[in-house]
Image: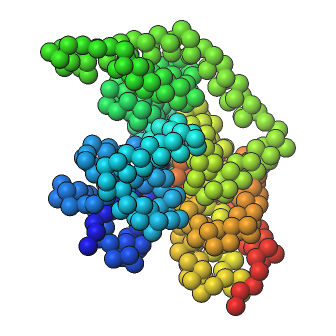
């Protein structure tokens, strides 16, 4: 029996990671192939691959949108693809991986993958998503603790020594203070591995201190990563002195270069951009707020956890560091709406769905309530030209209402579980989600044909 090992990892480590793993396992069982899949999710690596697993494997599949350490797979044919590809075409990936046995064929396949990735320009996106995946737990912890500090009143934290003060200090003064350095550091890590962490995190700290915000943190992360890559190529030392590179030369030179550029070149312009953006977002008219919320909603529903969805999510999450909380509320509400709307449609308009889809609708209630937009993927995959427009309209309505009501959210994830503690107006927020859910279901009723 052929044996394959695989690793799956998506930026948030919540839904796509496990959906890809499950699809690979189901396809392998169907094909009579032995497979073991390691999932690198939000709670860490599970079902970890051992040395014996890797040694016995005929091929390796890495389905990831974040950086995965490939050094342990040295000498094995490695097929690298997106998480979405593993969800859509698991059987094809296993077949493709098992055909990569000959070294020549393996090299050609790897070169082909790199060419495809270069053409699709996924490199920068992958580095950014690696940074975001490491940043999210800091933002979640900080946001929830800040929200809890408001239980005693919005100004209770100002009294030093009290519990609200302590919660604000932990959440806002510590966890939130680390989000930009972590984002920057792990973008650099994705590009240049461990040597990128020092200049990346220092650059992120300087982005905070200069007022360049999360946009400055993103720039400093890429700058740090590629500075390390360039220095490695530029500096050649004798074998006896190579040990100085990772502990002395690279960290000192890269940190100096990135630090000087952040202070004298990048910091001030990025601060001006962030100040203007923050002023525009906090002072926008109701009409502009509605349009902006609708755009965010359309982006969240368009690819249900893909690059467009993650772009909107990353933008809203980054704004939390600048104390701009309304876009985050619009993004989470719009991300909850697609699975909830489809779940409602399977109840109200059962004749539009197969038996399998009606069963999937039961799970979609839970996924939507938990802010896992990927719960809509099975429905969209079966009928994309009717389902995707329907969920986009519903999410646009939800996003627009959330911005119109000036609702704020201080935590970047959690769904219904954080609404009571992290949302400024829980009842209006639930109302906005409910309206978008109903609109989605009605759009499905209008566009989707009846099935036997």
Instruction: Work out whether 107 lies above or below 50.
Output: above
325 left or right, relative to 15: right
Q: Residue furthest bottom?
A: 452
Q: Position of residue 365 (x, y in %)?
A: 57, 72
| Labels in figure, total | 0
Instruction: Work out whether 91 lies above or below 14.
Output: below
Residue at position x 47%, y 19% in the image: 206
Quarter of the image for the C terminus: give it: bottom right
Q: Position of residue 294 (x, y in %)?
A: 76, 50
Q: Position of residue 350 (x, y in %)?
A: 69, 85
Residue at position x 32%, y 72% in the image: 33
Q: Quarter-wise, where is residue 194 in the image?
A: top left
Q: Residue furthest right?
A: 287
Q: Residue furthest left?
A: 240
334 left or right, relative to 369: right
Residue at position x 40%, y 78% in the image: 30
Q: Position of residue 119 (x, y in %)?
A: 58, 41
């Amino acid at each position: 029996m052929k044996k394959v090992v695989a690793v799956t990892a998506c930026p948030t480590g919540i839904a796509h990671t496990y959906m890809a793993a499950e699809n690979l396992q189901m396809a392998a069982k169907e094909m009579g192939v032995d497979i073991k899949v390691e999932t690198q999710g939000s709670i860490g690596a599970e079902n970890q691959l051992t040395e014996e697993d890797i040694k016995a494997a005929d091929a390796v599949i890495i389905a990831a949108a974040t950086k995965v350490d490939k050094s342990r797979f040295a000498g094995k044919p490695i097929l690298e693809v997106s998480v979405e590809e593993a969800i859509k075409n698991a059987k094809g990936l296993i077949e493709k991986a098992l055909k990569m046995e000959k070294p020549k064929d393996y090299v050609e396949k790897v070169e082909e993958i790199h060419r495809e990735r270069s053409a699709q320009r996924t490199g920068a996106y992958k580095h950014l998503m690696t940074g975001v995946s490491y940043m999210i737990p800091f933002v979640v912890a900080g946001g929830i603790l800040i929200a809890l500090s408001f239980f005693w009143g919005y100004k209770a934290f100002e009294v030093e020594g009290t519990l609200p003060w302590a919660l604000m200090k932990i959440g806002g003064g510590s966890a939130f203070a680390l989000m930009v350095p972590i984002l920057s550091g792990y973008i650099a890590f994705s590009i240049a591995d461990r040597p990128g962490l020092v200049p990346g995190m220092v650059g992120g700290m300087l982005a905070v201190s200069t007022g360049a915000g999360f946009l400055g943190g993103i720039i400093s992360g890429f700058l740090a990563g590629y500075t390390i890559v360039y220095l490695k190529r530029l500096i050649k030392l004798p074998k006896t002195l190579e040990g100085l590179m990772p502990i002395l030369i690279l960290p000192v030179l890269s940190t100096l270069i990135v630090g000087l550029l952040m202070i004298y070149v990048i910091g001030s312009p990025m601060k001006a951009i962030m100040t203007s953006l923050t002023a525009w977002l906090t002072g926008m008219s109701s009409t502009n707020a509605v349009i902006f919320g609708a755009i965010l909603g359309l982006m969240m529903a368009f690819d249900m956890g893909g690059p467009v969805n993650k772009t909107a999510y990353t933008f809203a999450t980054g704004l939390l560091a600048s104390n701009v909380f309304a876009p985050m509320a619009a993004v989470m509400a719009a991300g909850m709406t697609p699975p909830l709307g489809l779940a409602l449609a399977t109840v109200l308009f059962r004749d539009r769905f197969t038996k399998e889809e009606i069963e999937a609708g039961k799970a979609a209630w839970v996924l939507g309530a938990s802010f896992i937009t990927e719960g809509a993927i099975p429905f969209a995959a079966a009928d994309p030209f009717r389902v995707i427009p329907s969920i986009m309209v519903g999410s646009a309505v939800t996003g627009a209402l959330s911005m119109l009501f000036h609702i704020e959210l201080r935590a970047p994830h959690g769904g219904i579980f954080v609404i009571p503690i992290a949302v400024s107006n829980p009842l209006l927020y639930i109302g906005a989600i409910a309206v978008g859910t109903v609109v989605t279901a009605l759009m499905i009723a209008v566009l989707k044909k009846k099935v036997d």
